[in-house]
Amino acid sequence: MGGLGAVLAGTPALAQEGGMVGAPHAWGMGLQEAGGPIKEAIHDFNNLIFIIIVLITILVAGLLAWCLWRYRAEANPTPSTTSHHTLLEVAWTVVPVVILLVIAIPSFRLIYYEDRTPNADLTINVQGRQWYWHYSYPDHGNFAFDSYPIPEDQLPPERRHLYRLAVDNELVIPIGANVRVITQGYDVIHSFFVPALGIQRYTIPGRALETWMRADREGVFYGQCNQICGTNHWFMPIAVRAVSQADFDKWVAEARTRFARAEEPAAPALAAPAQTDDTVQIAEARR
Ligand SMILES: [Cu+2]
């Protein structure tokens, strides 16, 4: 880490917001817009479930209204004493089972689709730490860096709404690439969560979990630590910037010198060493 000044300089080559912005917005209804295929699959599944929910709600509300009207005391002075009806019993058991199967099949398909990619183009290690993210690119020279939120007063007015989302060092990925993401926890359980890319995985101390993401559109996709991890849980926003392969190569060349750490092992050590003075200082400065 080249000191606070270098950290605050951010990602100079890519400083502007370009393309799609994957972030929550006021009056947002439903899921965030999709930045890639996983989120598109989540949208499809969400739409299917929504239709099923609406149809069931209409059916139940309609039946209830009809019963209230048809069997009111005035219209039905001698109530039925029926206590059992085999055909009805079978029907209201079998029909829900069929509906659940209709939901379960695409649900499991989606879970396995999100789980991992069979053909990864690159791998990124994501480590959740109290309270910042530590990223490394093991197959691009193994540089590693930390990612902290940008303080509110250091965001230009047009980016002020991205406070608690915008970070100094963004995770950069090439568009159209299947990015294998290996998550690890450094101290406690965190969760790497970027809604617009449909990725969410715990980062657990002592375990390496795998998942993947892909952005098909250029843009910045924001997320946050999604597992309460202590006092500064809010201090862990995530920004994934998807750029063209050429811009990615340019960024990697620059990042390899800015973040050079030859001594860093490919996979960060699983045991949790004490925080370095450097990281404590930066965290302190940001408060
Ligand atoms: Cu966290």
Image (cartoon, rainbow, N blue to C red):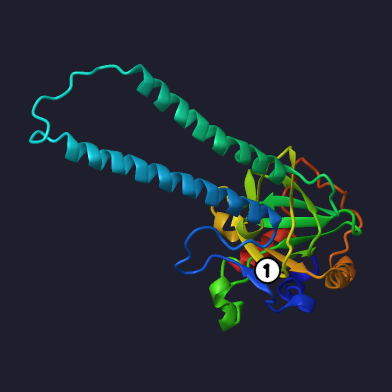
Residue drawn at (56%, 83%), measured in percent from left and top? 157
Q: Quadrant of the C terminus?
A: bottom right
Vertical side of 233 occupied by 148: above or below: below
* Nearer the observer, 69 or 30: 69
Label 1 CB-ligand 1 distance < 8 A: no
Residue 144 % position (x, y) = 82, 59
- Look at the numbered disc 1 and give the secondary structure of its residue: strand
Q: Quadrant of residue 84?
A: top left
Vertical side of 246 occupied by 187: above or below: above
Residue 189 visible here: yes
Residue drawn at (63%, 48%), measured in percent from left and top? 191
Residue drawn at (57%, 66%), measured in percent from left and top? 164
Residue drawn at (50%, 28%), measured in percent from left and top? 97
Answer left or right for 92 relative to 34. Answer: left
Give the amino acid at mark 1: Val
**How many numbered circles does the render carry?**
1
Residue 91 % position (x, y) = 41, 25
- Farthest bottom residue in view: 157
- Classed neighbour count for the residue bearing mark 1: other residues with Cα under 10 Å, few (<14), some (14–19), many (≥20): many
Residue 198 visible here: no
Residue 90 % position (x, y) = 41, 21
Residue 237 % position (x, y) = 62, 61
Q: Quadrant of residue 196?
A: bottom right
Answer left or right for 159 relative to 181. Answer: left
Q: Quadrant of the N terminus?
A: bottom right
* Nearer the observer, 287 or 41: 41
* Nearer the observer, 7 or 191: 191
Vertical side of 212 occupied by 79: above or below: above
Q: Which residue is mark 1?
A: 220
